[in-house]
Image (cartoon, rainbow, N blue to C red):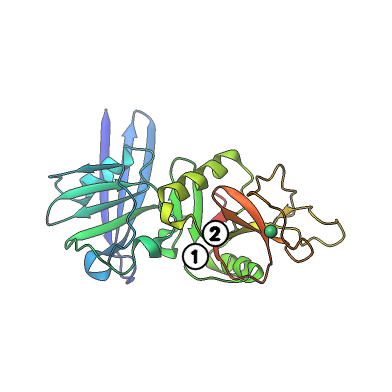
Amino acid sequence: MLLIETVRQVAVASFVFAVLLIRQSRGHCSEQLQFTGLAQYNDLKITKPINPLQTFTSLRDDMECARECMSLVRCSMFAFNELSLSCSLFPAPAFIYDFIALSSSPSPGQRYYAVSTDWCPAKKGFFFDRESELCYYGSQDKRAWNDSETACQELSTGSRLMMLKDTIHREAIARIMDANRYLNSDHLWIGGSDLNPGDGLLKYHWVDGTEIVNPVWNPGEPGGDLTNEFCLSYLLASFSDMRCTNENRYFCAKPK
Ligand SMILES: [Ca+2]
């Protein structure tokens, strides 16, 4: 038997306009997904859309769209248009402020929702990739590496510059970036560096102190000015070492 319960809450924050909770029970198993409303069309314009995984027409409401999203593990965000009753399912986007930015293609009635959990709060700008359970934040602002780590920690408890230790998370962020191809020209800070004193050059560690095993380097990296480039950036699923004072956008991540 499939039982679906839904709860609708109206939030007061300006960025978050509604929360949809959907509980799905199969036998003794129960799963609950929370979708946080991010924006309405009137608040935004879409300049760099990512391709939907699937679209539906003539759905009754955003709850039905949320259920379709829930049934597809790659769906981490959806848009429902209350005028045309169309529903689009999306993979996790890289940066909310690129996806929901100043607008070019009018879609009145459109509302956007992202999967959210208590520990991975969409209302703070984090995204939850359901497929890998990676919780991440892509910044809009650019900072030096140290300031980026500080910014990540200030965002939410446990948040740090992203450490890509697990294959599943490396694959997830590569897949997320691939769905956002327009981003693949900028270096993004991640949580790795050669800043540990006394361990020699080219000994890279994640921000929690663990050694980076088998880093995948971009062509010609690590290189450039080896005596001045100690911080790791991410581009096209590979790493580069850069001057830590360079200002880049950055990826934060939170453990579960
Ligand atoms: Ca370099």
Q: Left or right: where does residue 110 sit relative to residue 200?
A: left
**Residue 206: percent from left, percent from top:** 69, 54
The dot on residue 251 is 2
**Residue 60: percent from left, percent from top:** 14, 47
Residue under the image location 25 percent in, 65 percent down: 104
**Residue 77: percent from left, percent from top:** 34, 50
Q: Left or right: where does residue 152 sit relative to residue 195?
A: left
Q: Left or right: where does residue 116 sit relative to residue 206?
A: left
**Residue 69 visible in rendering:** yes
Q: Which structural element holds mark 1?
A: loop
Residue under the image location 47 percent in, 44 percent down: 175
Residue type at the position of mark 1: Ser
Nearest to the observer: residue 195 or residue 161: 195
Q: Which structural element holds mark 2?
A: strand
Q: Earlier in the sequence, mark 1 or mark 2?
A: 1
Within 10 Å of disc 2 (Cα), the crowding (few <14, some 14-19, many 20+) is: many
Nearest to the observer: residue 3 or residue 88: 88
Total marks shown come to 2
* Ligand 1 shown in quarter: bottom right
Q: CA distance from mark 1 to mark 2?
A: 6 Å
Within 10 Å of disc 1 (Cα), the crowding (few <14, some 14-19, many 20+) is: many
Residue at mark 2: C-beta within 8 A of ligand 1: no
Residue at mark 1: C-beta within 8 A of ligand 1: no
The dot on residue 184 is none
Quarter holding residue 231:
bottom right
Could you tell me if the residues under marks 1 and 2 are in contact, i.e. CB atoms within 8 Å? yes
Q: Which residue is mark 1?
A: 139
Nearest to the observer: residue 232 or residue 18: 232
Residue type at the position of mark 2: Phe
**Residue 117 visible in rendering:** no
